[in-house]
C-alpha cells in the first residue's frame, strides 16, 4: 500500500472518546484493538475509488453501507498509510497494510501484525495516526441512477 494513500476505520459509538455532554473528542484505543478471533484489523482503502479525498471518503462509506448496517452515530477514522506505519514502528509494532477485498467490499484492506493488546500502540493509533474523523450522518445517501 503506497505511503501517500489513506485508510479508513469504522468506529462504533461505544469506542468514540466523548465528553460529559456526549460531544465526540476522538477515538478510544479500543477502536483499534483486535478481537480474539481476528488476526488483522479491517480498514478500507480510500484510493481504491476515483476522485478527490472527499469523494473517495464518501464512496467508501457508501460502499460500506451497502455491505452492512452502519448506524447514524458511527464515525470513521481516517489516517495516512505512511504515517500509520511510522507511528506503529516507533511504538514497537511493525505492521503491514495490505489490500484484501472481500465480497461486497472492494475497498477492504487489512492491518496485519498489529500487536493485540499493546495499549501504547493502540493509543498512538488513536491520538497520532487516525487524525481525521468523519461522521456517517454527515455523508449523504447514494442516489440511484433512476433518480
Image: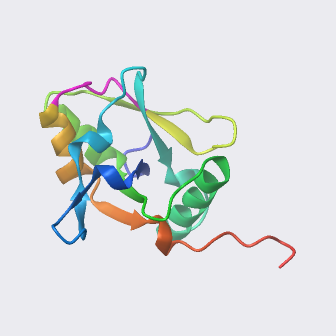
Report the residue at 34% width, 63% height from top.
133
Answer with left or right where residue 57 lies relative to residue 18. right
Answer with left or right where residue 108 lies relative to residue 90. right
Q: Would residue 90 be seen by someone viewing this image from the given angle?
A: no
**Looking at the picture, how far across and down is residue 88, in whole percent?**
21, 36
In the figure, residue 131 lies in which quadrant? bottom left
Q: Residue furthest front?
A: 20
Identify the main secondary structure in magenta: loop
Q: Nearer the viewer, residue 140 or 114?
A: 140
**Looking at the picture, how far across and down is residue 102, in whole percent?**
63, 34
Q: Residue furthest right?
A: 146
* Residue 116 sits inside the magenta stretch: yes
**Looking at the picture, how far across and down is residue 101, in whole percent?**
61, 36
The magenta-colored residue range is 111-118
As drawn, 37 above or below 27: above
Answer with left or right where residue 44 lies relative to residue 13. right
Report the residue at 50% width, 47% height from top.
45
Amino acid at each position: 500500500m503506497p505511503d501517500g494513500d489513506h485508510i479508513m476505520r469504522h468506529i462504533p459509538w461505544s469506542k468514540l472518546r466523548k465528553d460529559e455532554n456526549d460531544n465526540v473528542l476522538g477515538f478510544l484505543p479500543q477502536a483499534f484493538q483486535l478481537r480474539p478471533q481476528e488476526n488483522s484489523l479491517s480498514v478500507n482503502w480510500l484510493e481504491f475509488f476515483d476522485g478527490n479525498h472527499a469523494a473517495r471518503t464518501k464512496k467508501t462509506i457508501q460502499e460500506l453501507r451497502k455491505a452492512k448496517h452502519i448506524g447514524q452515530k458511527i464515525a470513521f477514522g481516517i489516517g495516512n498509510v505512511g504515517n500509520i506505519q511510522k507511528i506503529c514502528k516507533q511504538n514497537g509494532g511493525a505492521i503491514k497494510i495490505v489490500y484484501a477485498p472481500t465480497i461486497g467490499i472492494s475497498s477492504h484492506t487489512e492491518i496485519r501484525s498489529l500487536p493485540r493488546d499493546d495499549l501504547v500502540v493502540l493509543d498512538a493509533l488513536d491520538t497520532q495516526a487516525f487524525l481525521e474523523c468523519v461522521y456517517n450522518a454527515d455523508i449523504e445517501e447514494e442516489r440511484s441512477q433512476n433518480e
